[in-house]
Protein backbone atom coordinates (compact mmCIF):
# COMPACT_ATOMS: atom_id res chain seq x y z
CA UNK A 1 0.00 0.00 0.00
CA UNK A 2 2.99 2.35 0.49
CA UNK A 3 3.58 2.42 -3.28
CA UNK A 4 -0.06 3.24 -3.87
CA UNK A 5 0.12 6.13 -1.43
CA UNK A 6 3.11 7.56 -3.27
CA UNK A 7 1.14 7.33 -6.51
CA UNK A 8 -1.78 9.05 -4.83
CA UNK A 9 0.44 11.94 -3.74
CA UNK A 10 2.02 12.35 -7.17
CA UNK A 11 -1.32 12.21 -8.95
CA UNK A 12 -3.05 14.65 -6.63
CA UNK A 13 -0.19 17.13 -6.79
CA UNK A 14 -1.10 17.44 -10.44
CA UNK A 15 -4.83 17.63 -9.75
CA UNK A 16 -5.02 20.41 -7.19
CA UNK A 17 -6.43 22.69 -9.87
CA UNK A 18 -9.61 20.64 -9.70
CA UNK A 19 -11.26 23.52 -7.86
CA UNK A 20 -10.44 25.82 -10.75
CA UNK A 21 -7.83 28.05 -9.10
CA UNK A 22 -5.58 26.32 -6.55
CA UNK A 23 -1.98 25.34 -7.14
CA UNK A 24 0.83 24.16 -4.85
CA UNK A 25 2.28 27.68 -5.02
CA UNK A 26 -0.78 29.08 -3.32
CA UNK A 27 0.66 28.37 0.13
CA UNK A 28 -0.41 26.41 3.23
CA UNK A 29 -4.11 26.21 2.32
CA UNK A 30 -3.33 24.50 -0.97
CA UNK A 31 -0.95 22.09 0.74
CA UNK A 32 -3.64 21.28 3.32
CA UNK A 33 -6.03 20.56 0.45
CA UNK A 34 -3.48 18.19 -1.08
CA UNK A 35 -2.97 16.44 2.27
CA UNK A 36 -6.72 16.05 2.75
CA UNK A 37 -7.25 14.57 -0.71
CA UNK A 38 -4.28 12.24 -0.30
CA UNK A 39 -5.64 11.01 3.03
CA UNK A 40 -9.15 10.58 1.61
CA UNK A 41 -8.12 8.57 -1.42
CA UNK A 42 -5.51 6.48 0.38
CA UNK A 43 -7.89 5.63 3.23
CA UNK A 44 -10.69 4.81 0.81
CA UNK A 45 -8.43 2.49 -1.20
CA UNK A 46 -7.58 0.68 2.05
CA UNK A 47 -11.22 0.53 3.15
CA UNK A 48 -12.33 -0.74 -0.25
CA UNK A 49 -9.92 -3.66 -0.04
CA UNK A 50 -10.77 -4.44 3.58
CA UNK A 51 -14.54 -4.32 3.11
CA UNK A 52 -14.33 -6.46 -0.01
CA UNK A 53 -12.48 -9.12 1.98
CA UNK A 54 -14.53 -8.82 5.16
CA UNK A 55 -17.12 -11.21 6.46
CA UNK A 56 -20.83 -10.36 6.55
CA UNK A 57 -22.01 -7.26 8.42
CA UNK A 58 -25.23 -7.54 10.38
CA UNK A 59 -25.98 -3.79 10.36
CA UNK A 60 -27.14 -2.25 7.08
CA UNK A 61 -25.71 0.97 5.62
CA UNK A 62 -28.09 3.93 5.43
CA UNK A 63 -29.89 6.76 7.22
CA UNK A 64 -33.29 5.44 8.33
CA UNK A 65 -36.28 7.77 8.47
CA UNK A 66 -39.95 7.27 9.29
CA UNK A 67 -40.52 5.51 5.94
CA UNK A 68 -37.58 3.09 6.23
CA UNK A 69 -39.17 0.61 8.62
CA UNK A 70 -35.89 -0.11 10.42
CA UNK A 71 -34.33 1.21 13.62
CA UNK A 72 -30.99 2.95 14.04
CA UNK A 73 -29.70 -0.34 15.45
CA UNK A 74 -30.49 -2.10 12.18
CA UNK A 75 -29.31 0.63 9.80
CA UNK A 76 -26.51 3.16 10.32
CA UNK A 77 -24.45 5.49 8.07
CA UNK A 78 -21.28 3.46 8.55
CA UNK A 79 -19.84 0.08 7.69
CA UNK A 80 -17.60 -1.71 10.17
CA UNK A 81 -16.52 -5.07 8.81
CA UNK A 82 -13.41 -7.19 9.24
CA UNK A 83 -11.66 -4.59 11.36
CA UNK A 84 -12.17 -1.79 8.82
CA UNK A 85 -14.65 1.07 9.14
CA UNK A 86 -16.06 3.34 6.46
CA UNK A 87 -18.12 6.30 7.67
CA UNK A 88 -18.72 8.99 5.04
CA UNK A 89 -18.68 12.62 6.14
CA UNK A 90 -21.88 14.63 6.35
CA UNK A 91 -21.60 17.01 3.41
CA UNK A 92 -22.57 20.61 4.11
CA UNK A 93 -24.85 22.73 1.95
CA UNK A 94 -21.82 24.84 0.96
CA UNK A 95 -19.99 21.71 -0.24
CA UNK A 96 -23.06 20.56 -2.16
CA UNK A 97 -23.50 23.98 -3.77
CA UNK A 98 -19.85 23.93 -4.81
CA UNK A 99 -20.43 20.66 -6.66
CA UNK A 100 -23.42 22.17 -8.44
CA UNK A 101 -21.26 25.08 -9.60
CA UNK A 102 -18.68 22.85 -11.32
CA UNK A 103 -18.74 22.83 -15.13
CA UNK A 104 -18.56 19.50 -16.97
CA UNK A 105 -16.37 19.86 -20.07
CA UNK A 106 -17.53 16.60 -21.69
CA UNK A 107 -21.29 16.44 -20.99
CA UNK A 108 -23.44 13.48 -21.94
CA UNK A 109 -26.05 13.59 -24.66
CA UNK A 110 -29.64 13.15 -23.51
CA UNK A 111 -31.22 9.75 -24.16
CA UNK A 112 -33.49 9.80 -27.17
CA UNK A 113 -34.53 6.14 -26.96
CA UNK A 114 -35.70 3.94 -24.10
CA UNK A 115 -32.76 1.74 -22.97
CA UNK A 116 -35.24 -0.71 -21.43
CA UNK A 117 -36.38 -1.61 -24.94
CA UNK A 118 -33.04 -3.44 -25.37
CA UNK A 119 -31.77 -4.40 -21.89
CA UNK A 120 -29.14 -6.79 -23.26
CA UNK A 121 -27.35 -3.78 -24.77
CA UNK A 122 -26.98 -2.12 -21.35
CA UNK A 123 -24.95 -4.19 -18.92
CA UNK A 124 -22.94 -2.68 -16.01
CA UNK A 125 -19.15 -2.70 -16.46
CA UNK A 126 -17.62 -4.64 -13.58
CA UNK A 127 -14.43 -3.43 -11.91
CA UNK A 128 -14.27 -0.03 -13.60
CA UNK A 129 -14.06 3.33 -11.80
CA UNK A 130 -15.38 6.72 -12.87
CA UNK A 131 -12.94 9.53 -12.10
CA UNK A 132 -13.01 13.33 -12.05
CA UNK A 133 -10.21 15.14 -13.89
CA UNK A 134 -9.51 18.89 -13.69
CA UNK A 135 -10.15 20.91 -16.86
CA UNK A 136 -7.96 24.04 -16.49
CA UNK A 137 -9.26 25.62 -19.70
CA UNK A 138 -12.65 26.22 -18.02
CA UNK A 139 -13.25 28.04 -14.76
CA UNK A 140 -14.30 25.37 -12.23
CA UNK A 141 -14.18 22.90 -15.10
CA UNK A 142 -13.74 19.14 -14.92
CA UNK A 143 -13.96 16.05 -17.09
CA UNK A 144 -15.27 12.55 -16.40
CA UNK A 145 -13.35 9.49 -17.53
CA UNK A 146 -13.70 5.75 -16.98
CA UNK A 147 -10.69 3.76 -15.72
CA UNK A 148 -10.03 0.06 -15.25
CA UNK A 149 -9.56 0.53 -11.48
CA UNK A 150 -9.31 3.14 -8.72
CA UNK A 151 -5.54 2.81 -8.75
CA UNK A 152 -5.41 3.58 -12.47
CA UNK A 153 -7.66 6.63 -11.97
CA UNK A 154 -5.33 7.97 -9.29
CA UNK A 155 -2.15 7.41 -11.30
CA UNK A 156 -3.76 9.28 -14.21
CA UNK A 157 -4.42 12.31 -11.99
CA UNK A 158 -8.15 11.71 -11.47
CA UNK A 159 -10.09 11.67 -8.22
CA UNK A 160 -12.16 8.44 -8.06
CA UNK A 161 -15.85 9.36 -7.84
CA UNK A 162 -17.78 6.11 -8.03
CA UNK A 163 -17.38 2.45 -8.83
CA UNK A 164 -18.32 1.40 -12.35
CA UNK A 165 -18.11 3.15 -15.70
CA UNK A 166 -19.17 6.79 -15.97
CA UNK A 167 -22.79 7.29 -17.04
CA UNK A 168 -25.58 9.83 -17.30
CA UNK A 169 -25.79 10.43 -13.53
CA UNK A 170 -22.02 10.61 -12.94
CA UNK A 171 -21.75 14.45 -13.22
CA UNK A 172 -21.10 16.29 -9.98
CA UNK A 173 -24.42 18.14 -10.24
CA UNK A 174 -26.18 14.77 -9.93
CA UNK A 175 -23.90 13.74 -7.07
CA UNK A 176 -25.15 16.90 -5.35
CA UNK A 177 -28.75 15.67 -5.68
CA UNK A 178 -27.87 12.36 -4.01
CA UNK A 179 -26.14 14.23 -1.19
CA UNK A 180 -28.99 16.69 -0.64
CA UNK A 181 -31.79 14.10 -0.73
CA UNK A 182 -31.06 11.04 1.43
CA UNK A 183 -34.56 9.84 0.51
CA UNK A 184 -35.23 9.97 -3.24
CA UNK A 185 -37.75 7.13 -3.19
CA UNK A 186 -40.71 9.31 -2.26
CA UNK A 187 -39.96 12.35 -4.48
CA UNK A 188 -39.14 10.21 -7.54
CA UNK A 189 -42.32 8.21 -6.95
CA UNK A 190 -44.24 11.49 -6.76
CA UNK A 191 -42.72 12.52 -10.09
CA UNK A 192 -43.85 9.19 -11.55
CA UNK A 193 -47.41 9.73 -10.35
CA UNK A 194 -47.32 13.22 -11.84
CA UNK A 195 -46.29 11.66 -15.14
CA UNK A 196 -49.26 9.29 -15.05
CA UNK A 197 -51.70 12.14 -14.57
CA UNK A 198 -50.05 15.01 -16.45
CA UNK A 199 -47.73 13.42 -18.99
CA UNK A 200 -44.04 12.97 -19.78
CA UNK A 201 -42.96 16.63 -19.68
CA UNK A 202 -44.55 17.14 -16.26
CA UNK A 203 -42.64 14.14 -14.94
CA UNK A 204 -39.38 15.34 -16.48
CA UNK A 205 -39.86 18.82 -15.03
CA UNK A 206 -40.48 17.28 -11.61
CA UNK A 207 -37.19 15.36 -11.87
CA UNK A 208 -35.31 18.45 -13.02
CA UNK A 209 -36.70 20.36 -10.05
CA UNK A 210 -35.04 17.83 -7.76
CA UNK A 211 -31.75 19.05 -9.26
CA UNK A 212 -30.94 16.37 -11.83
CA UNK A 213 -29.51 17.57 -15.12
CA UNK A 214 -31.34 16.56 -18.30
CA UNK A 215 -29.48 13.28 -19.13
CA UNK A 216 -29.76 11.94 -15.56
CA UNK A 217 -33.41 13.00 -15.28
CA UNK A 218 -34.12 11.13 -18.51
CA UNK A 219 -32.77 7.77 -17.27
CA UNK A 220 -34.74 8.24 -14.04
CA UNK A 221 -37.83 8.82 -16.20
CA UNK A 222 -37.27 5.64 -18.20
CA UNK A 223 -36.49 3.70 -15.00
CA UNK A 224 -39.78 4.81 -13.46
CA UNK A 225 -41.73 3.87 -16.59
CA UNK A 226 -40.08 0.43 -16.68
CA UNK A 227 -40.93 -0.18 -13.01
CA UNK A 228 -44.53 0.93 -13.54
CA UNK A 229 -44.82 -1.58 -16.37
CA UNK A 230 -43.05 -4.52 -14.69
CA UNK A 231 -44.08 -3.95 -11.07
CA UNK A 232 -47.25 -1.82 -11.20
CA UNK A 233 -49.56 -4.21 -9.35
CA UNK A 234 -46.95 -5.10 -6.73
CA UNK A 235 -46.10 -1.44 -6.14
CA UNK A 236 -49.73 -0.40 -5.85
CA UNK A 237 -50.22 -2.99 -3.12
CA UNK A 238 -47.08 -1.77 -1.33
CA UNK A 239 -47.79 1.95 -1.76
CA UNK A 240 -48.06 2.73 1.96
CA UNK A 241 -45.65 0.07 3.21
CA UNK A 242 -42.23 0.87 4.75
CA UNK A 243 -39.25 0.49 2.44
CA UNK A 244 -38.09 -2.57 4.41
CA UNK A 245 -39.74 -5.52 6.06
CA UNK A 246 -38.66 -6.31 9.65
CA UNK A 247 -35.82 -8.67 8.63
CA UNK A 248 -34.16 -5.82 6.69
CA UNK A 249 -35.01 -6.93 3.16
CA UNK A 250 -36.75 -4.56 0.75
CA UNK A 251 -40.52 -4.51 0.40
CA UNK A 252 -41.98 -6.29 -2.63
CA UNK A 253 -42.20 -3.15 -4.78
CA UNK A 254 -38.63 -2.00 -4.21
CA UNK A 255 -37.34 -5.54 -4.65
CA UNK A 256 -39.20 -5.80 -7.96
CA UNK A 257 -37.70 -2.48 -9.10
CA UNK A 258 -34.26 -3.72 -8.05
CA UNK A 259 -34.57 -6.89 -10.09
CA UNK A 260 -36.49 -5.68 -13.13
CA UNK A 261 -35.22 -2.12 -13.60
CA UNK A 262 -31.99 -1.99 -11.60
CA UNK A 263 -29.46 -3.53 -14.03
CA UNK A 264 -30.26 -1.19 -16.94
CA UNK A 265 -30.36 1.82 -14.64
CA UNK A 266 -26.94 0.98 -13.18
CA UNK A 267 -25.43 0.54 -16.64
CA UNK A 268 -26.84 3.75 -18.09
CA UNK A 269 -26.81 6.04 -15.04
CA UNK A 270 -23.33 5.07 -13.86
CA UNK A 271 -23.69 6.62 -10.42
CA UNK A 272 -25.95 5.33 -7.68
CA UNK A 273 -25.72 5.69 -3.92
CA UNK A 274 -24.19 2.31 -3.20
CA UNK A 275 -21.35 2.66 -5.69
CA UNK A 276 -20.75 6.26 -4.54
CA UNK A 277 -20.47 5.67 -0.78
CA UNK A 278 -23.58 7.65 0.19
CA UNK A 279 -26.19 6.39 2.65
CA UNK A 280 -29.89 6.66 1.90
CA UNK A 281 -33.15 5.90 3.66
CA UNK A 282 -33.27 2.65 1.68
CA UNK A 283 -30.66 0.69 3.61
CA UNK A 284 -28.15 -1.62 1.94
CA UNK A 285 -25.82 -4.43 3.01
CA UNK A 286 -22.29 -3.18 3.57
CA UNK A 287 -21.00 -5.80 1.12
CA UNK A 288 -22.74 -3.79 -1.64
CA UNK A 289 -21.34 -0.41 -0.56
CA UNK A 290 -18.26 1.10 -2.20
CA UNK A 291 -16.40 3.58 0.05
CA UNK A 292 -15.75 7.02 -1.47
CA UNK A 293 -15.08 10.44 0.04
CA UNK A 294 -16.01 13.35 -2.22
CA UNK A 295 -13.53 16.19 -2.21
CA UNK A 296 -12.66 17.47 -5.67
Image (tube, rainbow, N blue to C red):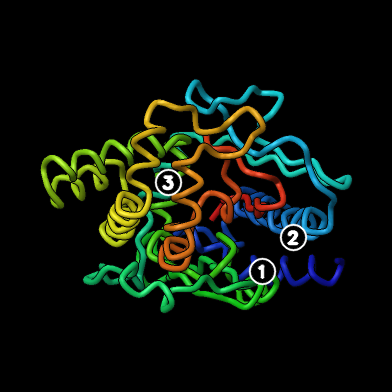
Q: In the rendered structure, are the residues bearing label 1 and label 2 in contact, judged by CB atoms less than 8 Å apart? A: yes
Measured as percent of width and height from the top left, residue 222 is found at 29, 58
Give the Cα separation between the discs numbered 1 and 2.
8 Å
Apparent side of residue 96 relative to residue 130 in the rendered image (left or right) = left
Quadrant showing the N terminus: bottom right
Q: Which residue was labeled with disc 3?
A: 176
* Residue at 57% in and 44% down: 278
At mark 1, the secondary structure is helix
How many C-alpha atoms fall within 10 Å of the one at disc 3: few (<14), some, or many (≥20)? many
| Label at residue 150 | 1
| Label at residue 45 | 2
Q: In the rendered structure, are the residues bearing label 2 and label 3 in contact, judged by CB atoms less than 8 Å apart? A: no
Mark sitting earlier along the chain (1/2): 2
Give the Cα separation between the discs numbered 1 and 3.
21 Å
Q: Quadrant of residue 153?
A: bottom right
* Residue at 77% in and 58% down: 52
Amino acid sequence: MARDRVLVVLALLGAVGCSGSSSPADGPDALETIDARVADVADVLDASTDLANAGPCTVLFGVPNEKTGLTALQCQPRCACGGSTFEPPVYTEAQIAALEARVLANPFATLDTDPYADPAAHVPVEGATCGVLPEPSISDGYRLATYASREEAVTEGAVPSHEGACGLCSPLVDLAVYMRHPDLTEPVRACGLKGLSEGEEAQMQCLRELGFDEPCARIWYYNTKATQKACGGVCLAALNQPYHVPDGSLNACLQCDEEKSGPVFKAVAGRNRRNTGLPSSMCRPCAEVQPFVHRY
